[in-house]
Image: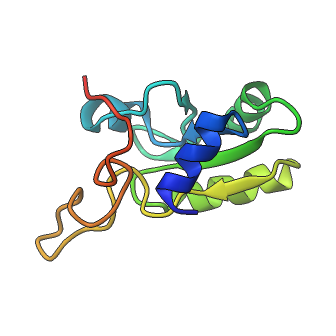
Amino acid sequence: MPPALAYSWWQAGDAVLVDVRTDAEREWVGFVPGAVALAWKQWPGMAMNQGFDEGLCAAVEPGKKVVLLCRSGVRSVAAAKRATELGFEAYNILEGFEGDPDANAQRGRKGGWRLRGLPWRQG
């Protein structure tokens, strides 16, 4: 789903926003205030977060949708599939937090939560 739609569902209370990036990514690149921080993979090494299922079930009350955010919208696809397997109505946020890389292989200039002007903070 587009970032703006995910944001509107979250703000209306219809969905829980789950940021599946690593703690390091959120700390260094930026984060969405109020989003649930629950890594899909752990830094360093990018091993699967063995506590993902338990953390998701604890963070999302029954009946709420889940919208999942990562850097580019790739890890959040896998996380959304897992959330669906767990019985949640789950959606991947397209473009992710930083969007796709541009011609110089840099992110933040081609789509993404930040570029779309949605709330975020750094530091």
Q: Quadrant of residue 44?
A: top left
Going 88% across and 34% down the picture, which residue do you hit?
A: 62
Q: Quadrant of residue 116?
A: bottom left
Q: State the residue lying farthest toward the bottom.
A: 103
Instruction: Using the rendered image of the protein, determine whether residue 62 is visible from the camera's viewpoint.
Output: yes
Using the image, determine if residue 20 lies above or below residue 91: above
Q: Position of residue 32 (x, y in %)?
A: 42, 33
Using the image, determine if residue 56 lies above or below residue 123: below
Instruction: Using the rendered image of the protein, determine whether residue 17 is visible from the camera's viewpoint.
Output: no
Q: Position of residue 63 (x, y in %)?
A: 87, 39
Which of 114/69 is in front?
114
What is the quadrant of the N terminus in the image? bottom right
Going 88% across and 49% down the picture, which residue do you hit?
A: 87
Using the image, determine if residue 114 lies above or below residue 11: below
Q: Position of residue 56 (x, y in %)?
A: 72, 34
Q: Position of residue 13 (x, y in %)?
A: 69, 33
Question: Which scheme is used to colour this image of the protein?
Answer: rainbow
Residue 65 relative to residue 72: left or right? right
What is the quadrant of the C terminus in the image? top left
Q: State the residue lying farthest toward the left.
A: 104
Going 17% across and 69% down the picture, which residue do you hit?
A: 105
Residue 92 relative to residue 117: left or right? right
Residue 12 relative to residue 121: left or right? right
Using the image, determine if residue 114 lies above or below residue 107: above
Going 72% across and 60% down the picture, which residue do you hit?
A: 81
Total number of numbered labels? 0
